[in-house]
Image: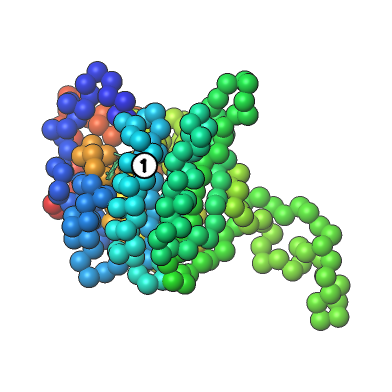
Amino acid sequence: MDVDADGIREKLLPHCRLKPGESWRDHDRGHIVACGDAADGEFVRGLFSSERATLAINDPPYNLVMFEKQSVEEYIDWCREWIAITYDILTDDASLYVWLGADQNDNFQPLPQFMLMMSETPFAARSFISVRNQRGYGTRKNWMAVRQELLYYTKGEPTFEVQYTDIPKILRGYYKEVNGTVTENLERGKSPNIRPGNIWVDIQQVFYRMEENVNGCYGQKALRAIQRIIEASSKEGELVTDFFAHSGTTLIACERTNRRCVTVDIDPIFAEITIRRLERFRSTGKTGWQAGNPFQEELAGKRPSRSRAGSL
Ligand SMILES: C[S@@+](CC[C@H](N)C(=O)[O-])C[C@H]1O[C@@H](n2cnc3c(N)ncnc32)[C@H](O)[C@@H]1O
């Protein structure tokens, strides 16, 4: 769906519940999926009524090859708009994570320009995380590009819950005296596993054999990465937002961790996929379609079966 093969968009659009400017409200848990422009302040602010979010996880298109490319200045001006809206809909003590790309064939844009733009906002920079992909890209004349950049900013003093990987601590030998007894680092630690730090090497990039895979969503992030962010930077019952829903990963992660989610996508097809992914998760426990796809019934000429959990 990211690439419009065989005019597939025309076939899928009639099956999408939301038109631009509309939203779907989930009756079970209070999530909202909306179809609209993240830079449209009136529309986005209107989704939040009186409650604000404690966490935003925004994963915009990166001004790279997949989406229509614009000048880096235009791209940053657009980012400035949705960043200002994000600031407004966050509580006084909140976190913002932004996934961003750096085009190594074009002076690493837009990452440095984005960082400079953020330095002029009231957000405080907290961490520059790199997530290691298993598959990379690039020629054999360069280092293989395997990094995804993830920026962490804060507003006020938000919650931060330390997270652990599944990787056991193996390094011993950092001795320190505690209350007159010499202790070794493993005894002093809170967990036998290591913390992810700001380089995450333990997260499997989504590919077609994984259950969580949503075919046609090439920008899909790993559920485990988003869940880690949510568990570190929000509490149960709180409101989390994502202005670029795509395959709906943030929504599924919120559902699994008892948070509520307000998520937006400009494209009715991705807004529909996001709603369907939640419905599928609730009815089957599956987090994606693996090798299948969210519109398989329509593409096979069948009437889709739909839950009644939400309304427009
Ligand atoms: C990189 S993807 C997000 C991937 C997502 N984190 C996931 O795991 O599936 C970016 C999404 O932003 C959407 N988008 C592009 N421009 C937008 C805009 N102005 N407002 C809202 N969504 C937009 C695209 O349709 C696309 O689905």
Q: Going by the image, does 301 lie left or right of 253?
A: left
Quadrant position of ligand 1:
top left
Q: Quadrant of residue 51?
A: bottom left
| Location of residue 240 in the rendering, given as x and y in whole percent from the top left corner | 35, 60
| Location of residue 164 in the rendering, given as x and y in whole percent from the top left corner | 60, 57
Amino acid type at mark 1: Glu
Can residue 77 be spotted in the picture?
A: yes
Q: 177 or 259: which is nearer to us?
A: 177
What residue is at 76 percent from the left and 63 percent from the top? 186
Where is mark 1, residue-wise?
Answer: 73
What residue is at 18 percent from the left and 55 percent from the top? 43
As displayed, is residue 102 above or below residue 94? above
Q: Quadrant of residue 64?
A: top left
What residue is at 80 percent from the left and 77 percent from the top? 178
As displayed, is residue 232 above or below residue 311? below
Q: 18 or 136: which is nearer to us?
A: 136
Q: 254 or 242: which is nearer to us?
A: 242
| Location of residue 171 in the rendering, given as x and y in whole percent from the top left corner | 78, 54
What residue is at 22 percent from the left and 56 percent from the top? 41
Q: Residue furthest top?
A: 6
Can residue 215 be spotted in the picture?
A: no
* Colour setup of the view: rainbow
As displayed, is residue 121 above or below residue 284? below
Q: Going by the image, does 126 lie left or right of 79?
A: right
Q: 140 or 306: which is nearer to us?
A: 140
Q: Quadrant of the N terminus?
A: top left
Q: Quadrant of residue 175?
A: bottom right
